[in-house]
Image (spheres, rainbow, N blue to C red):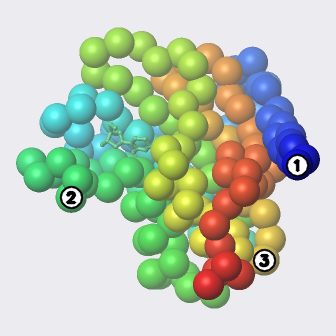
Amino acid sequence: MKQIDFTTSFTVFESTAELPQEVGLLMEKAVHARKNAYAPYSKFRVGAALLLDNGQVVIGSNQENAAYPSGLCAERVAVFQSGAVYPDAKILQMAISAASDTNTTTAPIPPCGACRQSIAEYEFRQESPIEIYFMGETGAVYKSDSLKNLLPFMFDKNFL
Ligand code: THU
């Protein structure tokens, strides 16, 4: 018997003021996207902004549904939109911001498990890492150099 350990790491920025300027601008786009979330049920709004290698920015926000599981998270709205509109472009960076209508979120809010799996598909497809920056409404921003930090031991097409 043996044990396998995975180590992941994140860079912590104390606030958006510490971000490189272009990342700060991308996070502003995620915040703007968040304001267009359709979240009447959870009152929890998430915005995502992707910077592509063709210079385009693609945004997404969570879109809920009265049949709850039919809704979709901001991150998947964004990556699916990117794949649909710019199938040959690589995603360089993703910025995520989440805020509740009922309390102020100060902790960095990471993508959910299903979104991690979806983002992983795009990282695999493009064969290059996606930088992921995530935050709440205020406070620290965490950066992952690759989706891999968020999803160790991931399932991918090589297992098929
Ligand atoms: N949500 C996202 O948009 N992204 C995540 O990674 C976590 C959760 C949305 C889904 C739902 O509309 C609301 O936040 C509450 O779960």
Q: Is mark 1 within 8 Å of ligand 1?
A: no
- N-term mark: 3 or 2: 2
Q: CA distance from mark 3 to mark 2?
A: 30 Å
Tell me: residue 78, above or below residue 90. Answer: above
Q: Label 1, on which residue? A: 1
Secondary element at image label 2: helix
Q: Residue furthest right?
A: 2
Q: Amino acid at mark 3?
A: Glu
Quarter of the image where one finds residue 143: top right
Q: Is mark 2 within 8 Å of ligand 1?
A: no
Q: Label 3, on which residue? A: 127
Q: Amino acid at mark 1?
A: Met
Which of the two discs, 2 and 1, sits closer to the camera?
1
Residue 70, numbered circle:
2
**Is residue 76 or residue 117 the one in the foreground?**
117
- N-term mark: 2 or 1: 1
Q: How many marks?
A: 3
Secondary element at image label 3: loop
Relative placement, left or right, of 36 versus 149 is: left
State the image coordinates of residue 39 (x, y, percent, origin top left).
Answer: 23, 39
Quarter of the image where one finds residue 159: bottom right
Instruction: Say whether residue 85 is visible.
Output: yes
Instruction: Say whether residue 93 is visible.
Output: no
User: If the picture is divided into quarters, which one holds ligand 1?
Assistant: top left
Other-residue count near label 1 (Cα within 10 Å), few / some / many at <14 / 14–19 / ≥20: few
**Is residue 45 or residue 18 the one in the foreground?**
45
